[in-house]
Structure formats: structure tokens, C-alpha cells
Amino acid sequence: MPLQLAVRGGPTVRYLTSSAASYTSSQKSFITDAMREIEEKTKVGSTNCVRFVARSSQPDYISIKPLTGCYSGVGKKSRGGSQDLSLARGCMNKGVIMHELLHTLGFHHEQSRADRDNYVTIHWDNIKDGKSSNFKKYELGYIQHLTNYDYGSIMHYGRYGFAADRTKPTITPKRDGATIGQRVALSTSDISEIRQFYNCGGSGSTNTATTSKPVTQKPVTQQPGTYLSFCNFDSGSLCGWTQDSSDDINWTLKSGATSSADTGPSSGYGGSGKYMYVEASGKSAGAVARLLSPRISHPGGSQQYCVTVSYHMYGNTMGNLMIGTKLGSSFKTMYTLKGEKGNSWRNMRLTTTISYSGSSLQFFFAGERGSGVRSDIAIDNVKISRGRC
């Protein structure tokens, strides 16, 4: 949801990163990785829609510094020159950085759209003093609506943004099951808006392959980015996911590296944050830990669903990761990832068609311990939505 007027002098944004004394090489890599992801996701064919280029002597540029909090001005200042983008401690998450970079590109928060009252309720009485401006609604003419309202936009606040009482929300979606506030990736609408705003052509779709075979059934139409369940575990919450009491062992919420050498991730997806994993030490070969999703409403009959997950399977005695459904009391595995996949996070999208007469169902992730202790299995950024991936 961008400003009405063009915001930068073309699709190239010059930037200057603060000195090495302010940012470590790892933190600088987070920043450039976020830039490269925006560039890659918004490409049309092999042509960049926007580019982030290190400044040499250009007069107009963004100066990235660890000031106070995570913030950026919206668009280019009318007088030009240097403008600050603050990425302080706690902002070193690729999704958070992309959020601030989209402000720089001219995009306001999604909940500031002119039509937002049709989609969310703002609880003004629970907003911290001095923070109400972050929930301001802008009229058409000042901003544009280039796509439909997107609960899954990386520019949307979460339920508890700037909450005075953290047990109560500041924003409530009006659509049942909608999840807001993700800071994982650009949504389809985010990509489409950037392409439209900068006249790049192309659609909002990306060139990502799914793990499932093509299907002939017409996909269910849904609001882009609206998830039945979404969790990156960073808040310390499991977002309604629960341990299955009928399995052998449990999943563990973790930040940083796992306790065993030569297995497991060193951090959550993107280099920070929390994740869920199955610890292999002290467990028997073949032991299974099953994590169950919140109960999801099922309209009956045949329905397509999309399951997206980041996973880490590193270790020379690696076991298996199963993705499946629980229909009533019956478990059914849909897909199995087998063996070591290298010491890095990988992403997977699975489209599945479920034929079931019940009114609700659950999905699960099951980690099966391998033949030895080097078989820690981890997951992060779990998303479930209706329709084809």
C-alpha cells in the first residue's frame, strides 16, 4: 500500500551501512540478504524491478544505523540527501529488515489502508501512549490500493503491536482464522504491489517450485497470505501447536545451537530466533516425536491445502521428517523427508488434497530419530493455508 506519488528517483536505492564498529559482518550479511531477497522475489524474468546498491558518492541515499529500535521513513525525503534507517539490537531478522526496506520503497503499514475497517478492528484503548500514529488510516488519494487487503503482508502489524497490556490485542482480524504480523517473507500481494508501483510489469507470482505433483482440481480461492496457521516460534509460543501424547518423545523449543556436535542448526531460520527440534541424544533409534497443529475447520468433501515449512536435517545418522494429517483419530503421512540434507535450513511447500467428511482436522510434523545421536531434526516458519501452494 504505497504513497500516491513516486518515492525514489528510480528503482535503484543507494545505501550506506554503518561502520564495522556498529555492525558485525554477520549483521551486515543479514541486511544485504534482505535486500537480495527483495530484489530476487520482485524480478520479472531476469530483470530487476528494484535494486539496492552500495553508495559511492551519490547525494541521495539511506543511511543504515543501529539507532533506537527498528524504523524507516516512508519513501524518499522531498529535499533528498541522507535519510536514516534504524536497525538496532533486536532488529536482525530478515523479515524485520525487509519490512523497514519496504517503508523506504514507499510502503505504509497494511493496517493503514483506507479500507482497513472492513478487515480489522483497532483497539485504541490498548495502544501505548505516543504510538497511536502507527495505526493511522490514510485516505485514497494520499495512498493507493494496488491489491486487495492482505492479512499476510509483511507490512501488517501483529495482534499485539504496541500493546499497553500484552495480554490483550491492539488489532483483531475480522476474518476467522486469519493470521497477521508475519515477518518471514514477502507475500504475493507485497510482490505484486512493488512491481506495479515501479511499473515493472509481471504478476505477483514467483518462480518457486512445490514439492507436490501438479493437480487438476481447481484450487480454492483465498485472500493471498491468509494462513489457517502460522508460527515462527520467536515469541516463545507454539501458536496452538501441541505435543502428541501418543508418540514416543517430544519436540523442544530452542534458540541457538542444539547441544550435540555435528548435528542440528546453530540458530533459527534466517540466523536468529527460535525453532522446534527433536533431540536425538538419549533416545532410541526409531523413536518418534509428533507435533500437532491447532484444529482447523474443514468444509467437508475434497479440499486442497498448502503446507510450508523451513526444515534442518544435518547429521550423518539422520532419521526422517514426516508431514501428515490427523483425521479423527487416524494419522496419515503425506510426505517423508529422509536422511541428511546438509548443514543449512531448507524450505518446502507441499500441496495436498484431502477428502474427508469431518468438520475439522489437524496436520502434524513427526521427527523420527535416526540410528545415532547425530540426527537432530528442526523445523521453523510453519504455515498452513487453503488452496494450492
Image (tube, rainbow, N blue to C red):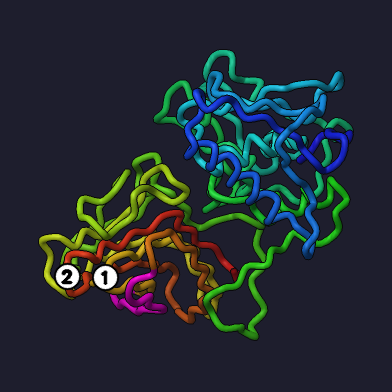
Q: Are marks 1 and 2 in contact (CB under 8 Å)?
A: yes
Q: Amino acid at mark 1?
A: Asn
**26 left or right of 279?**
right
Does residue 331 belong to the magenta stretch? Answer: yes
Residues rendered magenta in the picture: 328-341
**SS class of the residue under badge 1?**
loop
Q: Which residue is mark 1?
A: 316
**358 left or right of 76?**
left
Q: Amino acid at mark 2?
A: Gly
Q: Residue at x 75, y 57 (%)?
A: 43
* Residue 148 vertical placement versus 138 (above, below): below
Q: Position of residue 270 (x, y in %)?
A: 47, 48
Callout 2: few (<14), some (14-19), or many (20+) C-alpha neighbours within 10 Å? some
Q: Which of 228 and 360 lies nearest the eye of the viewer?
A: 228
Q: Which residue is mark 2?
A: 372
Q: Residue at x 41, y 55 (%)?
A: 380
Q: Position of residue 235 (x, y in %)?
A: 39, 39
Mark 1 and mark 2: Cα distance apart in space: 8 Å
Does residue 147 belong to the magenta stretch? Answer: no
* Residue 46 vertical placement versus 197 (above, below): below
